[in-house]
Image (spheres, rainbow, N blue to C red):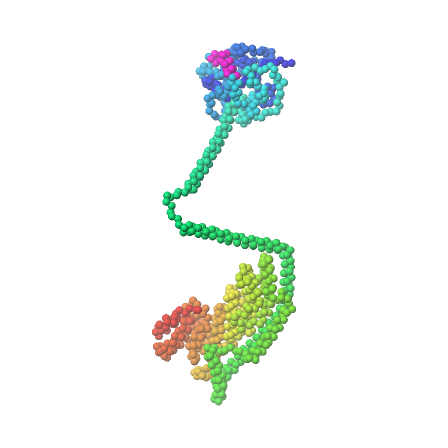
């Protein structure tokens, strides 16, 4: 159907080798060599790129009408030379200059003849700069033989020097065939396809000796398999697309770029291998150095002569090693014991947590709430009986004490009235009889006072009255035992009550502290403690008998633990709070109703109990609470009433008092010592009562108002002893750190100084009796810190040796 056209295959010259060939052939830039393409046909069609193609090889076709086969190489060469001459002539006439360096086969449909040109382009699409290869002709064996054109010779002047002859062309063709037969080339694509087209390599005839002439038996273009799927782009094509270069300009440099890419990849591999080798060498060198250092450390240099080794040295080393191992063993055993303790504690905690479920906790709270409700109801009912018994007992003791006070006051009143009448009576007989009777009574009283350091005895009831009192108290105590007879021990025994709260504290400590149980316990236990303290009398308890009661032992164990071990929880203050809110109010009642400040026994017992509460339970320290304030106010009020109502020192004429044996003088001394006794009892409350209140009672009211009037009368039988007794009754804490006399003691100091001067005037200062009397008065002055007065008296009467021998200037309170 179709005219079969002859096929001529010309290998396209690559751009990568064109530069070398031009340098060898032309010898410079700017030279254009054009060769007519009539060797094959007048028109060429170059097909490159991807898409649908009928042929993958470069072929040149002529018009169908002018088709004629090529019989021999000589004809081709002759026609090539003729056409080249014509082309050169045309180019010279037109004066056109071409600068492309690409050996291309163009398809010029308008022109009758098609030519291929060797061009040198000024705009080279070179992507990388590489060194020129010396054997570029060896890398491009398919390129034609170079045509050398001197740079000074133009194509117009010397055309023959440009154009090779037939023998050279044949030699070049044979060389290309020989090179092509050795397969000494690298495929440009990964799949081995040619860069000129997309047809696979099985259509190429590289193994034939003559590749320019195809076999006529090959299928035509319409019989070949057409590949519609586009092939994958090569690296060269992707680079060309990114750089924006033309496809024609890259077609000639694909081999150079491929070689450049291969060299880069090879270089990377070589560098990586060298780096790995250097790393391995460095590691090996470092390991060798470490091995050498280890060998040096391990190497032991033995001296030529070893020191002698004895059995003792070996034993010593063995003992040292044994001791170190024993110490390590002990440490391991201690650690093992600690770990065992931790395990036991963890096991106990796990058991406790497993047992303490929400259900059991709710059950415990319900039972505890029911128990507390029943306890409060029980105590609310029994507190009425306790209050009545307590009131009855206090009333009994108060009535008994009031009777004693009334009897004592009545006796003093009657005696004072009798002596007053005796002083102004003119009836000598009555006076003598009265004197006889009164003198006997006063003399007996005075003798008793002298036997007891001049202090009067306490007022005591008679034996019959004491017996009746004890009988009534026993009846009240007996009736008090029946108060809780109908109550279970869980609601009346302090120990069992506290055990319930202790279980709460141990099992659910958080809720226990949140409920402020430590603040509720004193009020809750108050009725039961008061019931047990019903028979306790602080005016006769000098050793703290309340600590031997059952409630105290149970409460102490609850607060401090067994063996008096102080526990680290808030209940350690519960015992002090109970004593402050239960025991102290009971003592306050005794102070207000029963206590006699003139009684030495009662004052000593009461003050000792209060000092014990202060030292052991810190009741009177810090900011005073309401019970403490009530107690101190009651004590001050009771002492003040005693000074106002029970202290009485009568005044008699001087002529009566000059007789030391008269009843008036004896009665006055008796009342004086009664006031000194009260002053001594007040001293027991030092550090318990406010200092200002105590100074006001002792110095302002008692000393300066009553005692100083009697001392200044100079009618006492033993004035010096009286002064010493008064000074001993003053609290030592008042003079601690003080070097001057108190303002309230100025009258007392003046009396002592006047007394010293009177003794030294009446008797010689060198007299031993005088000296002893003066030393006694100087000691009294030293006790009240009258150091300046002591120095004045010592200088005046030459008693400097007495100051140092008795240390009168260094009286520190004990």
Q: Which of 703 and 507 is in front in this view?
A: 507
Question: What span is colored magenta in the figure?
Answer: 159-177
Say above or below: 199 vs 717: above
At 43% from the left and 79% from the top, the residue drawn is: 718
Q: Quadrant of the C terminus?
A: bottom left
Say above or below: 350 vs 374: above
The count of marks equals: 0
Q: In this view, does 624 lie to the left or right of 358?
A: left
Residue 238 counted in the magenta span:
no
Say above or below: 631 vs 709: above
**Residue with the most extreme bottom position:** 429
Residue 71 drawn at (x, y percent) = 56, 10
Dominant secondary structure, magenta = helix
Residue 44 drawn at (x, y percent) = 56, 16
At 44% from the left and 67% from the top, the residue drawn is: 736
Residue 105 drawn at (x, y percent) = 54, 17
Residue 393 drawn at (x, y percent) = 59, 73
Residue 172 counted in the magenta span:
yes
Say above or below: 502 vs 137: below
Q: In which quarter of the image is the N terminus?
A: top right
């Amino acid at each position: 159907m179709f005219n079969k056209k002859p096929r001529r295959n010309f290998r396209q010259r690559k751009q990568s080798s064109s530069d070398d060939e031009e340098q060898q052939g032309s010898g410079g830039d700017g030279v254009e060599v054009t060769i007519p393409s009539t060797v094959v046909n007048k028109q060429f069609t170059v097909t490159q790129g991807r898409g649908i193609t009928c042929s993958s090889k470069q072929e040149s076709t002529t018009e169908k009408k002018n088709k004629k086969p090529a019989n021999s190489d000589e004809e081709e060469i002759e026609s090539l030379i003729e056409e080249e001459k014509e082309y050169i002539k045309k180019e010279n006439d037109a004066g056109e200059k071409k600068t492309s360096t690409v050996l291309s086969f163009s398809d010029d449909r308008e022109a009758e003849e098609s030519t291929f040109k060797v061009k040198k382009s000024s705009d080279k699409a070179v992507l990388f700069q590489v060194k020129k290869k010396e054997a570029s002709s060896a890398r491009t064996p398919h390129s034609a033989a170079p045509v050398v054109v001197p740079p000074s010779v133009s194509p117009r002047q010397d055309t023959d020097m440009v154009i090779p002859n037939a023998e050279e062309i044949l030699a070049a063709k044979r060389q290309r065939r020989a090179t092509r037969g050795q397969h000494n080339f690298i495929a440009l694509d990964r799949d081995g396809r040619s860069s000129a087209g997309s047809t696979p390599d099985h259509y190429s005839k590289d193994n034939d000796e003559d590749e320019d002439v195809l076999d006529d038996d090959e299928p035509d273009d319409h019989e070949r398999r057409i590949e519609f799927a586009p092939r994958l782009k090569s690296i060269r094509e992707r680079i060309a697309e990114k750089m924006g270069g033309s496809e024609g300009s890259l077609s000639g440099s694909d081999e150079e770029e491929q070689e450049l890419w291969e060299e880069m990849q090879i270089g990377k591999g070589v560098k990586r291998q060298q780096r790995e080798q250097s790393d391995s060498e460095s590691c090996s060198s470092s390991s060798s150095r470490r091995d050498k250092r280890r060998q040096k450390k391990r190497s032991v240099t033995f001296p030529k002569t070893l020191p002698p080794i004895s059995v003792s040295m070996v034993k010593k080393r063995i003992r040292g090693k044994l001791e170190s191992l024993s110490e390590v063993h002990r440490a391991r055993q201690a650690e093992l014991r600690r770990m065992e303790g931790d395990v036991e504690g963890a096991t106990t905690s796990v058991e406790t947590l497993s047992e303490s479920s929400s259900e059991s906790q709710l059950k415990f709270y319900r039972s505890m709430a029911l128990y507390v409700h029943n306890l409060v109801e029980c105590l609310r009912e029994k507190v009425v009986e306790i209050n009545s018994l307590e009131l009855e007992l206090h009333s009994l003791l108060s009535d008994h004490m009031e009777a004693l006070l009334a009897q004592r006051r009545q006796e003093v009143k009657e005696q004072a009235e009798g002596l007053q009448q005796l002083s102004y009576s003119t009836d000598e007989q009555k006076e003598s009889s009265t004197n006889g009777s009164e003198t006997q009574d006063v003399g007996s009283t005075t003798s008793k006072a002298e036997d007891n350091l001049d202090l009067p005895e306490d007022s005591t009831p008679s034996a019959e009255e004491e017996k009746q009192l004890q009988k009534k108290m026993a009846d009240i105590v007996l009736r008090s035992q029946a108060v809780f007879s109908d109550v279970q021990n869980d609601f009346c025994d302090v120990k069992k009550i506290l055990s319930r709260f202790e279980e709460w504290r141990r099992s659910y400590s958080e809720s226990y502290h949140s409920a402020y149980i430590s603040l509720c316990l004193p009020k809750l236990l108050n009725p039961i403690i008061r019931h047990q303290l019903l028979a306790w009398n602080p005016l006769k308890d000098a050793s703290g008998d309340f600590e031997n009661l059952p409630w105290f032992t149970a409460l102490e164990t609850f607060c401090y633990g067994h063996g008096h071990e102080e526990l680290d929880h808030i209940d350690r203050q519960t015992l002090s709070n109970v004593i402050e809110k239960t025991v102290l109010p009971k003592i306050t009642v005794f102070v207000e109703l029963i206590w006699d400040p003139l009684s030495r026994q009662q004052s000593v017992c009461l003050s000792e109990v209060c000092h014990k509460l202060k030292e052991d339970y810190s009741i009177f320290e810090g900011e005073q609470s309401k019970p403490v304030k009530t107690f101190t106010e009651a004590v001050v009020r009771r002492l003040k009433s005693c000074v106002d109502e029970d202290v009485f020192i009568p005044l008699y004429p001087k002529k009566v008092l000059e007789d030391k044996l008269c009843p008036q003088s004896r009665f006055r001394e008796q009342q004086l010592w009664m006031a000194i006794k009260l002053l001594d009892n007040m001293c027991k409350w030092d550090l318990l009562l406010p200092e200002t209140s105590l100074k006001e009672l002792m110095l302002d009211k008692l000393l300066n108002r009553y005692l100083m009037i009697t001392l200044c009368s100079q009618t006492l039988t033993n004035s010096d002893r009286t002064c010493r007794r008064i000074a001993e009754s003053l609290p030592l804490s008042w003079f601690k750190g003080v070097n001057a006399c108190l303002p309230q003691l100025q009258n007392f100091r003046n009396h002592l100084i006047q007394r010293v001067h009177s003794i030294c005037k009446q008797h010689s200062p060198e007299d031993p009796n005088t000296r002893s009397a003066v030393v006694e008065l100087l000691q009294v002055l030293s006790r009240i810190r009258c150091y300046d007065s002591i120095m004045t008296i010592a200088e005046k009467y030459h008693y400097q040796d007495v100051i140092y021998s008795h240390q009168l200037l260094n009286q520190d309170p004990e």
